[in-house]
Amino acid sequence: MTSGIAAQGPYFLAASPLPAEGIAQHAWLLIALPAFGAAVLLLGGRRTNAWGHLLGCATVLAAFGYGLALFLSAGAFGEAARVRELSLFSWIPVNALQVDFGLRLDPLSLVFVLLVTGVGALIHIYSIGYMAHDPNRRKFFAYLNLFVAAMLLLVLGNSFVSLYFGWEGVGLASYLLIAFWHHRPAAATAAKKAFLMNRVGDVGLALAIFIMFAQLGTTQYTEVFARAGEFSSAQLVALTLLILLGAAGKSGQFPLQAWLPDAMEGPTPVSALIHAATMVTAGVYLIARANPIYNLTADGRLAVMAIGAITLLLGAIIGCAYDDFKKVLAYSTVSQIGYMILAVGLGPFGYALGIMHLLTHGFFKAGLFLGAGSVMHGMNDEGNIRRLGGLWRYMPITFATWGLAYLALIGFPGLSGFFSKDAIIEAAFGQAGWRGWVFGGAALLGAGITAFYMTRLMLMVFFGKERWRELRTEDGREYHPHESPLVMTVPMILLALGSVGAGFFFAQGHRLTGYLAPSLGGLQEAHGPLPALAITGLTITLVALGALVAWLVVGRRPVPVERPERVSLPVRAARADLYANAVNETLVARTGTWLARALVFLDNRGVDGLVNGIAALLGGSSSRLRRLQTGFVRSYALSMLGGSVLVIAALMVVRFA
Amino acid sequence: MTTSAVLLLALMAVPVVGAVIVALVRGSDVAARGTALGFSFIELALAAAVWASYQPGGARLQMVSSADWIAPVGVHLSFGVDGIALVMVAVIALLVPIVIGFSWNFQPPTGRSLGSFLSLLLLQQGLMVGVFAATDVFLFYVLFEIMLIPMYFLIGGYGGQRRQYAAVKFFLYSFLGGLLMLASAIGAYVYAADKTGSGTFDWQTLVGVMRDAPLSLQIWLFLGFFAAFAIKAPLVPFHTWLPDAASEAPIGVAVILVGVLDKVGTFGFLRYNLALFPAASQELAPWVLALAVAGVLYGALLAVGQRDMQRMIAYVSISHFGFIALGIFAFSSQAQAGAVTYMVNHSIATGMLLLLIGMVAARGGSRLISDYGGMARVTPVLGGLFLVAGLTTLSLPGTNSFISEFLVLLGSFPREPVFTVVAALGMVLAALYVLWLYQRVFHGPVRGTALVEAAPGPGAVGDPARAEVPDLSKRELVVLAPLVVAVLGLGVYPKPLLDVVTPSVGATMTEAGVTDPVTAQGGK
């Protein structure tokens, strides 16, 4: 494969970004609006209960409106002038290190602004209904606003340090929202686990920033990208792997995927916004943003592709085994982000494709989660799909919107996912040699498995026998399924429209990939051994096959309400998350606990004694010191020292023995 | 003597005068605490004036004044500050009124009064300002030792059950370290006398003389100072006094002890070890770095394993002192600026966390983590602020501690990549000890007999959720508010702090004979 420098757009290395002008000079408002909302709701306390949720929605809607205006006004610029920077203030200035706090307004950040504020606004509105009965609804909106502000900082920052600020900021918002019902121990534990596993990735990202500073003396995007050629090849590999580690933590990629399914303990709108549509895709954003670095190392890109391919299969396989509505969707997210990571790993052949799948996924996965929330809302929070069934006639809008998002996800021809996923599979096949076959094959296989587990989910929730009729909730109530209120269904309808049309809109005339070129370089066409039409045909066949198998397993036969325990080894492995948690538990948690306990014991018993020993040792060395130096005052000082050491040592032995 | 020099002298004198007056009115708690608070506010205003008249990038030491003390051996009463001493002096001035506000209703053990407690606190403040402002090595030594006395009484007289043991242990460790430093100071004096014909303890003169001393001599003298400072800002394995002292001390005293008094150690590394013994500093840096990084992980792991919240903070601090020492001995202006701001930010962050632990304990009657659960539902404001303190302790971006930890690691990396990578693991452990503590105390179902017994309101028995444990009072909110402002303000806009610190760090680098490994054009 070519090393890819030629693949860069003509714009990237050309010059530093132009200064922001016009309305873009106030782009800080994008972050300030939701941050203001969060501050008012948190400081205002109960006084804001009555209108807090409205303020929360208003700030995000305003940010969306502003983002849209920015987007449209930027359209007037020629391609080369679409990368702009707004300098705000000097953040961390220490001699050579000059971290400037500023915003980078370019096609890549602007599409994220629209995604985050657009989907964010819909989910805010949905939450008015979903959280209507929660006494802490105000706090929920405060945290959601905090998240939007942090996420916008993440994508708009103009240096790796600003990105890191937003990066850990969204981690905090995620922590707060997963633990929103923190009286439930599972929620509290899941939140802590999410933060910790993210922190592991964050350390990787931090180390990558240190390498940039050590080599270039800067962390600003413009300079790092312009001078990426100055990194040694070892540094490039280290950088790409460390950035990948950061991306894996945030995006739930192998080997740091285990936190994301647990994060479903949070309220469902959170799962939709943070743990499906936006925050967890930040890893994809990071790698795409760092494309001038990834362009320079095929080895680094290979690692990215491998992680993406492993994760997309792993997520899909585990997704087949779960009976929890949201957990299946969570593993589906893990798997779909695997596709995106695989795409950005393809380098100039895939950055823009990864972003395209990210955007379409934002629509249909948010729609799927909101639909799941709507189902659970109408079913006394029942999330076990074995206890659902036949719900299509009770929740027609939910069923229709969910169904469209489902078709989009499995890649039904003409819908969003078809365009974005098919493009990735084709591009993966386009890789030279064994890589094309391995990564293309993995992506293709993943599409089939995706169709299986999603169809299984669809059939078990909306079709088949109404299994809930004979069942009672935990506190003994009957189930009365009902459609959700308009405030919830309207956002779902809008997301369904996106699930249907976004893919075609983006793909037509290479609209999106062309638009992103100033940020990501022009998209290179891949030419693999198989013709594109054959790959499309194969994909559709596998998808149909997956759906058919699902129908044979759960559609044609009645579904048992209790999960069968006598199952084959692969199913057992998938139910145990392919043993990821077990490995974490043994390797990290138990070892760590043991180490901490052993050290506490040692510190209480051992180190005090050791210090007494050292004191005696110092007494000994002082006599050597005396021989070394001559002179009256000196030896006086040293004998005084020796004497005091002995006195003190004796005192300590007597006192603490 | 310039006006600003008078300001600096007043900054030392005012708390001491305040201590005397408070001691005189100690019979009445109301009068004593009002007077003490008044003096601490005057001190805060003075500190602001000192800050305003300090010129970053100006003379190495500013607001200098000097008077003969023990003329025959060239000991002077001389004072002055650089940017590093200035920010520490400012932190003391900020923390003392907060601690007084926190201790407003403090009930000392029988036989002791709130007035004498506050009097000792003010005396401690004046002595600490003196230690940071002293520019004569002998004077520094004297204040370094005298400073132990009020702290000895504050711990031993007003602390928990094992307070006597903890106070004696604190005193002996520190005193031993001080003696080693004295021996080294005399050694430096003698060397200077040999070289120049007249002995002196003047810091700036000694810096000029000692830089040419032979390496072997530098190493021995370095070790004397190092012992004193490694005990004070405890580096593993010289740390065992701190968990006892910090957990037996009353919370307010622990804030001053961990927040400021221990920082004399890291301050001493910069001012004395690096500046007086540059060759030895470079020679021994790998060993110090090894201790520092070991401390980062050791302190963090022990913090994970603690059952007592206040004792846990002592270990957290040991971990953070490791970061500070790493930053100092990694020899880059970013790392050292990080270390100095770490000294400030750790005071604010840990101070806030300790105060909140005090507020939790005041409600639950216990400092054991296992006595709590689900407090975020009972006292949501307390829970929220505790989380803010926790997040700055784990150095979340946007909080003050992030700036310093990030600078330390980023600045250490170019020269010491291995130590930096190992220390960076401390970031993960910090998230673990903070969030696990938070989960056990504030999340989960409401539980804990302590919580119920502390406030047996109606319906409390058997139903801790309805126990009438009050959320934060107005006074407590006022005490915490300045810290919250500092946490967020210095996290988003640390430039005022960095602007003061950076030139002094640059001067320290020059004295230590090192240059930055990375320029604006990149690494070497």
Image (tube, coloured by chain):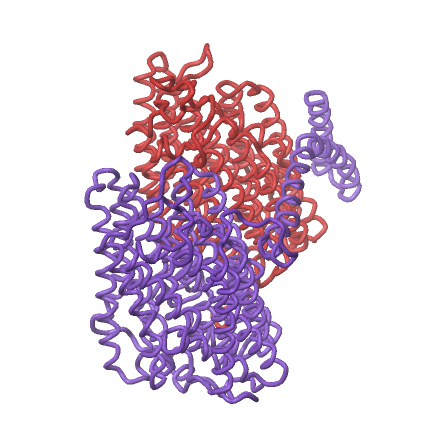
Chain colours: A purple, B red
| Residue drawn 43% across the image and 64% down it | A281
Report x, y in % for residue A310: 58, 67
In the depicted view, which residue is nearer to us: A134 or B519? A134
Percent of width and height locating residue A534 = 51, 86
The percent position of residue A550, horizontal first and vertical second, equals 50, 64
- Residue B100 vertical position relative to residue A375 in the rendered view, above or below: above
Q: Quadrant of the C terminus of chain B?
A: bottom right
Judging depth in this view, the residue of A116 and A433 nearest the camera is A433
Is A316 situated above or below B354? Answer: below
Is A115 displayed left or right of B285 in the figure?
Answer: left
Measured as percent of width and height from the top left, residue B330 is found at: 58, 56
Extreme-top residue of the structure: B111
Above or below residue A639? Residue B423 is below
| Count of picture labels | 0
Task: Note whether residue B196 is visible.
Answer: no
Q: Is residue B421 left or right of residue B101?
A: right
Quick check: A221 above or below A325? below
Residue A144 seen in the current view: yes
As rendered, which of B20 and B308 lies closer to the eye? B308
Instruction: State the residue at coordinates (41%, 66%).
Output: A159
Dividing the image into 4 quarters, which one contains the N terminus of chain B? top left
